[in-house]
Image: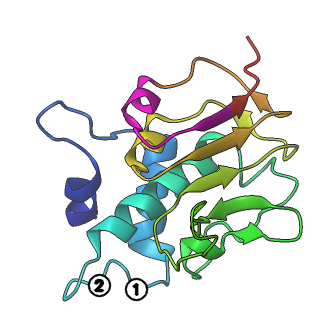
């Protein structure tokens, strides 16, 4: 658990979850105790996958995924996080992007899109979404998202599309 925390959170700023009821703690607990993807094995930890799985899991818990989402989209499954989607509805997490110049779709294992419209998300977008450094698309309209968008979104230099409606 501690090794995962050190990969994802900044001890120097005190930015470490301490409440077991927080979405961050729930995501870390899932990664450490339930996740069967083997990304956290001690002999070969894959820090980039741990970080993006933790960010996606935190989004899931912060927006009521376990209780409210209409479509679970394979979130928190043992599958690669790039498979946490429904390609028929274009909802979920996607990792492949189309190169506009060549039209090719390169294989990618880095999250570039999170599209969760009309999925009954309820809660706030967590700051951990800012850990998804390759995110180009965040599409979460027509839900019950509340609060302010996290300032960590400003650090996403690749983000070109943001669509959400915040309920105040």
How far across and down, in percent of the image, does residue 41 sit? 29, 84
Left or right: 166 as drawn, with respect to 79: right
Way the structure is coloured: rainbow
Where residue 87 sits: x, y (%)?
80, 71
* In the image, residue 18 lies in the stretch drawn in magenta: no
Q: Which residues are magenta?
A: 151-162
In the rendered structure, the answer to whether residue 123 lies left or right of residue 148 reads: right
Along the line of sight, which residue is nearer the eye, 101 or 141? 101
Question: Residue 58 placed where, x, y %?
Answer: 52, 49
Instruction: Indicate the quadrant where residue 19 lies.
Output: top left
Describe residue 19's horizontal placement relative to residue 69 as left or right: left
Numbered marks: total: 2
- Asked whether the residues under the numbered discs 1 and 2 touch, taking CB atoms below 8 Å apart as contact, a structural biologist would say yes
Q: Is residue 21 visible?
A: no
Write down the residue under mark 1: 38
Mark 1–mark 2 Cα distance, whole angstroms, equals 6 Å
- Residue name at image x 49 percent, y 74 percent: 108
Which residue does the image show at 27% across and 63% down from the upper left?
4
Q: Quadrant of the N terminus?
A: bottom left
Q: Is residue 115 above or below residue 153?
A: below
| Image location of residue 102, percent across then percent down | 58, 70
- Say whether residue 161 is magenta: yes
Pointer 1 local density, CA inside 10 Å: few below 14, some 14–19, many at least 20: some
Mark 2 nearby-residue class (10 Å; few <14, some 14–19, many ≥20): few
**Quadrant where the C terminus is found in the figure:** top right
In the image, residue 12 sits, relative to residue 23, either above or below, namely above
């Amino acid at each position: 658990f501690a090794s995962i925390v050190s990969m994802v959170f900044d001890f120097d700023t005190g930015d470490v979850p301490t409440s077991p009821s927080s979405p961050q703690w729930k995501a870390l607990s899932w990664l450490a105790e339930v996740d069967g993807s083997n990304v956290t094995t001690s002999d070969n930890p894959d820090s980039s996958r741990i970080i993006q799985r933790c960010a996606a899991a935190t989004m899931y818990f912060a927006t009521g995924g376990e209780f409210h989402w209409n479509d679970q989209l394979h979130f928190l499954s043992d599958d690669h996080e790039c498979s946490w989607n429904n390609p028929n509805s274009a909802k979920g997490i996607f990792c492949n992007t189309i190169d506009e110049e060549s039209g090719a779709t390169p294989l990618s294992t880095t999250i570039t899109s999170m599209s969760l419209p009309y999925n009954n998300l309820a809660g706030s977008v967590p700051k951990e979404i800012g850990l998804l450094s390759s995110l180009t698309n965040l599409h979460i309209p027509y839900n019950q998202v509340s609060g302010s968008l996290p300032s960590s979104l400003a650090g996403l230099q690749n983000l070109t599309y943001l669509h959400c409606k915040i309920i105040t």
